[in-house]
Image (cartoon, coloured by chain):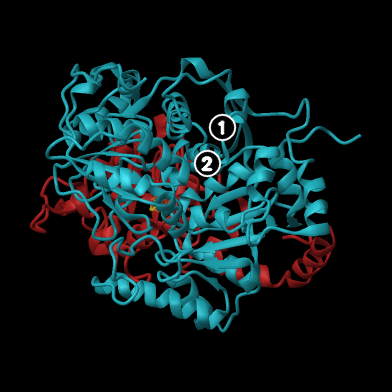
Chain colours: A red, B cyan
Amino acid sequence: MEKFTKITGIAAPMPLVNIDTDMIIPKQFLKTIKRTGLGVNLFDEMRYDEQGNEKPDFVLNKPQYRDAQILIAGDNFGCGSSREHAPWALLDFGIRAVVSTSYADIFFNNCFKNGILPIILPEDQVQYLMDDASKGANARITVDLESQTVTASDGTTFAFEVEPFRKHCLLNGLDDIGLTLEKADKIDAFEDKAKQLFPWA
Amino acid sequence: MTAPKTLYDKIWDAHLVDESDDGTCLLYIDRHLVHEVTSPQAFEGLRMTGRKVRAPEKTIAVPDHNVPTTPGRETRIENAESRIQVDALDKNARDFGIHYYPVADVRQGIVHIIGPEQGWTLPGMTIVCGDSHTATHGAFGALAHGIGTSEVEHVLATQTLIQSKSKNMKVEITGKLSPGVTAKDITLAVIGKIGTAGGTGHVIEYCGEAIRDLSMEGRMTVCNMAIEAGARAGLIAPDEKTFDYVRGRPHAPKGAVWEAAMAYWKTLFSDEGAHFDKVVTIRGEDIAPVVTWGTSPEDVLPITAEVPDPASFPGGKSGAAKRSLEYMGLKPGMKLTDIKVDAVFIGSCTNGRIEDLRAAAEILKGRKLAPGVRGMVVPGSGLVRLQAEEEGLAEIFIDAGFEWRLAGCSMCLGMNPDQLAPGERCAGTSNRNFEGRMGRGGRTHLMSPVMAAAAAVTGHLTDVRELMAETA
Ligand code: SF4
């Protein structure tokens, strides 16, 4: 997994609430058996018309947002299915951080496994960044995981929370399977105990 | 004396392998269900790192999401990408030695239907699957939730999951349901009340007389949609109905082990005085047959209502409602019962079980699909299909003009050929009405099987109680 330390980049505003994973990556693109290559189909049905032409008014099609690395979105971002294709598509497009007031659980988890930082801020701060992002490509926003801050283009800085373990993994690009396997003896011990207590499982 | 615990606390504590200083926990997983869409990259990951499946005997795989539901699929799946995914699952199941139900097996079906059917799902277990509707298994008092593909790989390799504990939420449905009101109406009414983010960060325990009165099938319908309320999982404490359902299933314990299991399962309930961070109570009598009008499962209204005015919603919701109505092709103020449908879909892991088919058939008996309406019934598993054929339900559906399909997810997510055309409107028994869910541009109204059957007969959204009055 790619490390996440600090990025400064263009933020695309998406002021919609309940952006679900079907919108982020529609199901016809779930038939892949790979993790990469989904970026062109990110937000497919909002981004392209039926003939496959770009819709000029969709935010990521506008010249100033084509290289966005950050998304500023409405409440409950990523609700819906468990498809990890959603963060894969975001990442493949180049999005490394999302800012919203809230996320669906599974999506939130999936982001951390793929080097994407989902940031939770209160509504007024999300709105501030949304307005900032609406200014276009000159408004570069900085996300710093080490110091746990988001800085708007005018220097206004907001602090955010992140679980220490997730921060550690993201900062160091750690594969958590490897970390868990280091605890194999504990898993063995649990299984031995469970065999006695819950033989049916 | 230990502090009173919730059901969730008890299952959590019984599966805790390790807790780090920062509160990150390692949870043991008893059952891992796998399907073709969210697993290929996980198996690929195992191969790349030379890792094995730690507990193949606890891992069960079935293709369901994009298999066609028409005959001939055992020999050839036309769509190349779907075929590649199903072939990949075939191979992965064989290579890693996990339990497998191929399309040709009569026991094949939607993963959340066959888990309980085969007795893999038992009370008190932890169950995960790379699918958000894993919450379904919570109906047995099992802690069950959806995970992403990286986590699928993590569980395959370690049989554990890194988790932080959720909060406890209690949803109590008191009293009795009125005639024509079903488990689906309960679960939709709850989402309508608390919103799609209302349960975020929580595990919901459903309780109360109306929940106790539900069959196991109904309880699965309720828990299935806990995820649509944003919750990590839904739970219902096991009782005699649960034990009766489980007893004798192929993978359920037998003999002395069964007795030991029962003794343990009977301790699985929230203790008197256990703390819940959030409590919601709804009177069963206040729940009407409901339908969704928009593109979020929280867009719920009683069938007797009218399409709402977006201006009546607060702040950001107003824009979402306006966008929903445009997508759905509806005008504020029109009666919900005036909405005409082009298609009716009965199936999915929400409502594809035998009881759902019985309920829909009861309404359809002696009636026909309205002219111009296409009807499709997709049983949740091969065994549900067989049983429905034996009970004569299939005949009722076919006589009414429905297509009688093979088991799978089908139009619920439209990954296989069963899809709506742009602008087509469907009365569906599934769980998501998102834009494009059943096919690009397709419009979905969620409802119970009896309500879907009523819409099939009249050709528009209909209060099933009127048809029930006719037959009574
Ligand atoms: S029936 Fe629908 S919701 Fe259920 S597992 Fe299949 S696609 Fe998911």
Q: Foreground residue, B448 or B166?
A: B448
Marks 2 and 1 on same chain: yes
| Label 2 within 8 A of ligand 1 by Cβ | no
Amino acid carrying mark 1 in the image: Leu
- Circle 1 packing at 10 Å, graded few (<14), some (14-19), many (20+), is some
Helix, strand or loop at disc 1? Answer: loop
| x, y percent for residue B186 | 48, 28
- Whether tag 2 and tag 1 are in contact, CB under 8 A, the answer is yes
Image quadrant occupied by the C terminus of chain A: bottom right
Query: Image check: B422 left or right of B147?
Result: left
Image vertical order of residue B177 relative to residue B70, above or below: above
Q: Residue at x 43, y 37 (%)?
A: A101
Q: Residue at x 43, y 72 (%)?
A: B40
Disc number for residue B217: 2
| x, y percent for residue B102 | 44, 71
| x, y percent for residue A38 | 29, 65
| Label 1 within 8 A of ligand 1 by Cβ | no
Image vertical order of residue A98 relative to residue B234, above or below: below
Q: Which residue is mark 1?
A: B214
Provide the chain ID for the residue under circle 2.
B
